[in-house]
Amino acid sequence: MPADTFGLSHEHRARASQADVVARWRHHWWNPSAPAPAGDDLLSLLARAEYGRGSDRHGAGKLPPDDLLAADLRRAARSGAPWPPLALVTAAQGTPMLRSSLAEAWAETVTAGSRAHARSALRSRLLTTVNAAETACLLDLAEAHGQRPLTAAECAPHARSAHSVQRHAALRYLSGIPGGPAVLPPRPIRPSDPYERLLLSAAWERAEPGGLLGADFRRAVDGLPARPARGMVVAQSMMLGQLDEPGTGLSGGMSVLVAGLGDAMAATSQVSRVLTLVLTDSRGLRRGRPLVELLGSEHWALRIPVPGSDPVGPATALALRPAIAWWATRLLALPGAAPDVVHARYADDCSLAVADAARRSGSRFVFTATPDPHRTMAERHRGVPRTSQGEPASALRLDLHRIFVGDRLVARSDLLVTIPSGTGSSDLSVHFPQLADARATRRIASPPEGIPPFTPGSDDDHISAALLERLFQGGERPDGIDPVARGMRLFLSVGRLHPVKQQDRLVESWLESGLHHSTAMLLIGGSAAGATPVEKEMRSKITKLLAGRPEARRHIALWPALPNRQVRILERALASGRETGRVLYVCPSAKEEFGLALLEAMDSGLVAAGPRRGGVPHYIRDGANGFLLPTESTSALAKGLLALAEHSDGELARIAAKGRTSVAARFSASAMAESLAAEYAQLAAL
């Protein structure tokens, strides 16, 4: 039975993909001899349109024209086949998702040598279109590839447009063409908009370095010293949520990982400086937050401005990609930056923007590939009617787009990083069939993941006492537990409030199992103020589950996110057993690519239980140093919680000790940093 390059047999890999229509269609694209699956629901038809070959695509014509065009653009980008530029530019009048796919197909066309025809097509369309979003898209395509379809004088009216998207794209375009300074506005159209003020200043600074009108931008980036004479400069991105607010909005374990890894990486002998690319919105700009900020010893944040103040997620990133790429390119070009390597870790348009900036900066590009959202496509989206127009259909289309984005990031990467899982790299082989023979042609690495060490402080006891007092302040409060429950076993779960984290399922399972009578629960996550719609929905679901259950309500506390250090102090206090009964840390997620919060809980001395799906089985051996839980349904999770509760305190103490030893031996941020630095050094030397 031959094995593929990830140590998984071809037969095993094929069997694993049978239940997933998207995985089967993707295997068919890269291996036409693989059977084409059937199906007439929306998921099947969209996958058929994107991955079918020849007659296999029959039936996809039932889809709306935009779906068919998106599929054609993605097929062109994946195959590297250039399209006639005049045919491509018509897609600029479509949705943000279409325009993102267009950008990838356009890059392939330009790379194939069609620059003159591409410039002509852009010019023809720009001189006839009156649509603001379409004009912005075309100008951004030109700017991204150094094309000049319009003269400065021809573009000048766009820089005075009443539509901000068109106006901002024109400023970006004019900043890089001959004659641009002559027509750049001397002051913003909307002086009260801090984003536009800074954008105009950055455009002026690019067009006329050192000029008076670029002073605002220069002040915002002041502080980054000249690039060190020796050692690599490494850039990494973390654009979902806030780097310093884990557990709120879209900020999760990734913010903790990136912050700790940046510090550890800068301390290695091979890396002299780490730059972490994050986003800052109009609120931060209005407060005067600089775009360059020191986070640790030679670990710097480079803050990329985005307009407005709405959280940036995979859906909103679609429209922001050109602007983020432009800003990232400007910041990476700072004298103290010029990274050798740029590393992105999430499959969305923010990461594509980072890849764009890496290309334009001449940096090597690294991408961490995970089968997300690949592995949940079938269970989440199977059966959505092909005529559906609501939220399920929108979510399905966005997930398929993210799979396409993942393919593009894999194709662009000079080094591909994978996260080990409990079954080797089987999930990756199933969901990225293009990697089956990849080791012969590209660099692939699987460095260990890790967490930063906990450093005790003089105020730890004071902080832990205050947190425990808050926890047992009384069951009549939503953030407190009845003091009489202090001796009960406590289930603890920390993470951002999000459907994939399934805190609502955890509460429902706790209730269904009857454990709410004999145990307590603490959930930590979500914004303290300004909750996102997703966080509000999750809190509403939990509140409804507890309605009419006063005993359960007195045994559960819901806290907003805490700073990571406070979480780790609390976990250590709970693990000591001096103040409470035995505490079990539970991660009820549908899947975890790795689960850094679980590692932190294990490091603190807590018994940890996480989902079977994803990377958790890579470091938790069920019943030995932790527990693996079935999280695919409420009933399955309820049974898992009951099984946990049956273990004696002695057994749990033994397992917790082994868990702590496992983390200390294998999962430190410094080991991860050293391993990655070695990979980066090899890459930079090529």
Image (cartoon, rainbow, N blue to C red):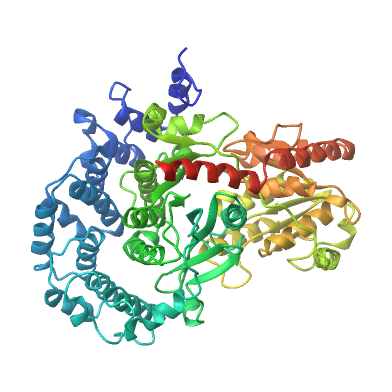
Residue farthest toward the top in the current orientation of the protein: 1
**Viewer-proximal residue, 570 or 259?**
259
Residue 413 location in percent, x, y?
A: 38, 43
Residue 338 location in percent, x, y?
A: 41, 60
x 48%, y 49%: residue: 345
Is residue 282 in sight in this rendering? no
**Viewer-proximal residue, 488 or 627?**
627
State the image quarter where residue 638 is shown. Answer: top right
**Viewer-proximal residue, 523 or 235?**
235
Q: Is residue 336 above or below residue 347?
A: below
Q: In the image, is 463 to the left or to the right of 678? A: right
Q: In the image, is 489 to the left or to the right of 147? A: right
x 31%, y 29%: residue: 30
Q: Is residue 549 above or below residue 152?
A: above
Q: In the image, is 617 to the left or to the right of 4? A: right
Which of the image's four quarters has the C terminus?
top left
Is residue 116 in sight in this rendering? yes
State the image quarter where residue 19 is shown. Answer: top left
State the image quarter where residue 471 is shown. Answer: bottom right
Residue 250 location in percent, x, y?
A: 53, 59
